[in-house]
Image (cartoon, grey):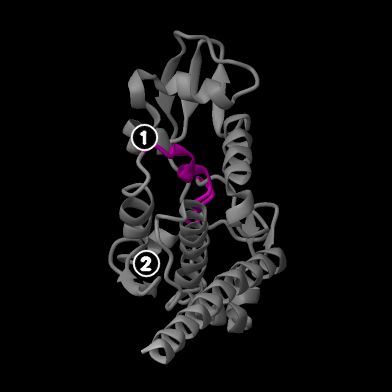
Amino acid sequence: MKYSIMVLFLSMATMTATFGQSTADFFTKADAFFKTNVTDGRVNYSAVKANPGDLNELLEAAKNIIVTEANANEYQAFYINGYNLLVIKGIIDNYPLKSPLDVGGFFDGKKYEIGGKKTTLNDIENKLLRGKFPSEARFHFVLVCGGLGCPPIINKAYMPVTLDAQLEKQTKLALNNPQFIQLNKSKVKISQIFEWYKGDFTQNGQSLVDFINKYKSEQLPEKTRVSYYPYDWTLNETK
């Protein structure tokens, strides 16, 4: 009996170590991939298309990595990176193209295997991330849809140990970008992201302007009138 318990304990310890290593390996390789293929918020899709081995290896590993909400930073970082990698995968599978919307069902039809389940890009965003962590509006500034209307993709992976700082940084960068928040006297034009996901930004009675002012260096006047400029779905491709 004691021998069986010891064998079970050692087996569980080995599984835990392997799991931890595979997760760490995923983040390390994802970081290297983004560093190689992303420049100034744009992706070198032609290079990835020509040599897809690193991307395919990452996504193959991601199929069997299981993360849980109990470790929120690891879970969120895994699915944020996974989403951004799968967007790139969806684009190179259909490359060349001018926009991800050129592909029918790009976000809500095509299913990918990640984290031990089959899911669409929309479900990663809306069920696995927003659905599990409804108070985290900063997701909208790190999930990159492949269009120029998105906040820019960064040339590094989101890491569990630095996730909060990275979420904060990308949110501040977006909301202090005069192209993203277009101010003209008492009027401001903002991304349709704020229209589509208004509820995420107006929790606990705050307005859209309240949310923006939490991160904007130069505060918008309280009574600023808000409108939305058209979303740019042009591919965020390296020039």
User: Where are the magenta residues, as a range?
Assistant: 135-149
How far apart are the two marked residues, 2 and 1, measured between alpha carbons? 28 Å
Q: Is residue 74 magenta?
A: no
Q: To which residue does mark 2 refer? A: 103
Type of secondary structure dominating the magenta stretch: loop
Picture layout, residue 126 above or below residue 67: above
Q: Is residue 137 magenta?
A: yes
Q: To which residue does mark 1 refer? A: 200
Position of residue 96 in the picture relative to residue 239 (left or right): left
Q: Nearer the viewer, mark 2 or mark 1?
A: 1
**Residue occupying image coordinates x 39% and y 63%:** 102
> In the image, residue 71 lies at what x, y percent?
47, 56
Q: 11 or 44, which lies in front?
A: 11
**Residue occupying image coordinates x 56% and y 16%:** 184
Mark positioned earlier in the residue sequence (2 or 1)? 2
**In the rendered picture of this protein, how many numbered marks are placed on residues?**
2
Picture layout, residue 130 above or below residue 237: above
> In the image, residue 106 lies at what x, y percent?
36, 65
Q: 51 or 215, which lies in front?
A: 215
Q: Amino acid at mark 1?
A: Asp
Picture layout, residue 45 above or below residue 233: below
**Residue occupying image coordinates x 70% and y 52%:** 40
**Residue occupying image coordinates x 55% and y 28%:** 181
Q: Quadrant of the image for the C terminus?
A: bottom right
Picture quarter containing residue 215?
top right
> In the image, residue 210 lies at what x, y percent?
46, 19
> In the image, residue 156 lies at what x, y percent?
67, 59
Position of residue 211 in the picture relative to residue 20 (left or right): left
Whether residue 111 is visible: no
Q: Amino acid at mark 2?
A: Val
